[in-house]
Structures are given as structure tokens and as C-alpha cells.
Amino acid sequence: MSKRFHVAILGATGVVGREFIRCLEEREFPVEKLTLLASPRSEGEMLEFKDEELPVRAVKAEHFQGVQIALFSPGASVSREWAPVAAKAGAMVIDNSSAFRMEADVPLIVPEVNPDAVAMARSRSIIANPNCSTIQMVVALKPLHDAANILRVVVSTYQSVSGKGQKGIAELEKQTGDLMNAREVEPLAFPHRIAFNVLPHIDDFTENGYTKEEMKMVNETRKILGVPDLRVSATTVRVPVFFGHSEAINITTERKLTAEQARELLRKAPGVKVLDDPKANVYPMPMLAAGDDATHVGRIREDISQMNGLDLFVCADNLRKGAALNAVQIAELLVQRALV
């Protein structure tokens, strides 16, 4: 009989937490016991896993006793408090927040890109799940980087409101209804109205004029690809889409890649689905990526403004590959390599 695991989810009632549960069930992860944890206000809520109703408990240290794998998505401050507690209790923590991503002794993992980094997890028993926009970008970039050595990346994102959690989804729903019924709109989750609007502003602005979200993409891409001096510039934008992030990516490579060579590399790449037939109006869109585990890549073309450049358009489900699915794939990697 194959080994089964006691898994805990912290942040179980949030949009990513619920997606953790769905991914564990869909992928038939070997769960022996599932413990659902959240803040005290969610205690007593019931969530379904494999046709069984499980209670949500307010997080306490005692709840991590016997847990082997802990999936976290409670926000950075809560992760900083509870991840060391869970790790000390013997769990391997896979954290979806930004709390540990740039710490040198914590691996930052996308299984299709840098699976060998998982060996580092032994030091602190904490693994960081990258930012949702970074994940889908590096899945698309990895095969191109291996073939031609990427020197520079310029990316503009079009990120759905679910990246802000349930409150982002609710705000777009409410504002759309308010505008359609000639009612006043009050922005709460976002700094301005999001319905029928585009906001070039995700997270706080930093002193260099970039937002924290943009700098996450810069620094995380360098760490995951193992290129600390990679030139990356990002502009992150919130758009009135419920699920699925999109990215327009321009790269400069050391060696020339034709568009067809890039398509062929991407067709063979793990986790990638190439949708690239513009004459038939086939290209990635968030509505196609939502609910799909693959990273969709299309509009692949040679950049006419430089010698060794490519443009591509990338979409992925930000709650699945951008968060919960990637974390569960990391858990699968831990099992495969007998690290839990």
C-alpha cells in the first residue's frame, strides 16, 4: 500500500484555500487525513472533501501535530507567524504568500522549471510558492531560455480581480451591477473603480516607481531561473476579468530563435498548451485558461524591432497554476523524492 499523508491547509476558507482542496481531490493526492485551518472567524464552517464535510478550525499550534504537509495561503504576516510553528511540529510547509520567497535558504519552486531546488527544503522545512504572474511566465520562458539564453524580459500583465481574493471578485460583481443600474460606485478593494476600467496599479508603489507586484516578478524570475542579473522589467495591471491572468511578454535572447522554433519548443514543454493560429482566431484568452491546469501560450512572433527577440502572449488560471495547483505539484514532488 502506498504511503498516505496528513495534510493541513491554513487559509482553507479563502479562494486559494478552497482551490487547494479541489486540486488535492482532483489529482488524487494521497491524503490520509485533511485538517482545515483558518482565522477564528471561520471556525465551525464546513467544507467538502471527497464527499465528506470537514470542519474548519481556528489555527493553533496543536493542530500541526502529526501533519506532514501544510499548504498555506493566509497572507504574509500570518505565514511568518505560523510557518515556523508548523515546521517545528514536523510539517513540510508550502507557503503561497510572499513571506519567504526571497529568503536565500528557502526554495522558490515551479516544478516544471526548477524541481531540483526542492532539495533545499530540508534546511527549514519551508518552500515558497511564487507569485501567480511569475509562475505562468517562467513556465513559458524556461524552454526558450534553455534553448537560446534569455538576456532580457519585458512583461505587461493583465491580472484578474480574483488575484485580490474573494473581496476582489465581489467588488467587480457589485460594481458591474451598480453601473448597469445607474447607481453610484464605491471602490473598496481597489483604489479606483475596477468595473469597465483598467488599473495600472497592483500592490504598493516603491521608491523606484515600480510596484511591489512588479518587483516580485523581477526578483522571483531571477531566483527561479537561476540568473541573478537577468534584466526584467514589469508593468502589472488589474483588469475587469474574474479569473485568469494574461501577460504580453517580450524577450531578447543570446541566440536567434525563430517563431516556429519557439512554437516547437513550447509544444514539447511540460505544463504548456500552445494556442497559436491567429488566422483562425486561436490564441490564449483568460476565459480559456480558467479552470485549466496548463499555461496557454500563443501570438508567438519574432520581434521586428530587434535581432534576437520574440513576443508571446501567455494566460493561466491564477488560482490554479498561479497558486493552488503549483503548491500541490510541489507536494507531489516532495512525495516523489521521498522528502516527506
Image (cartoon, rainbow, N blue to C red):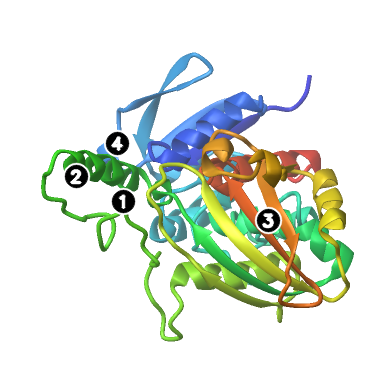
| Secondary-structure class at tag 1 | loop
* Closer to viewer: mark 4 or mark 2: 2
Mark 1 near mark 2, Cβ–Cβ under 8 Å?
yes
The residue positioned 74% from the left and 39% from the top of the image is 335
Q: Amino acid at mark 3?
A: Ile
Question: Which sits earlier in the primary sequence, circle 1 or circle 4?
Answer: 4
Question: Which sits earlier in the primary sequence, circle 4 or circle 2?
Answer: 4
Q: Residues within 10 Å of mark 3 (few under 14, many from 20)?
A: many
Question: Which sits earlier in the primary sequence, circle 2 or circle 3?
Answer: 3
- Residue at the left extreme of this rendering: 183
* Closer to viewer: mark 2 or mark 3: 2
Q: CA distance from mark 3 to mark 1?
A: 35 Å
Dot 4 corresponds to which residue?
42
Dot 3 corresponds to which residue?
109
Reply above or below: 165 against 2: below
Judging depth in this view, the residue of 23 and 242 nearest the camera is: 242
| Secondary-structure class at tag 2 | helix
Dot 1 corresponds to which residue?
196
Mark 3 near mark 1, Cβ–Cβ under 8 Å?
no
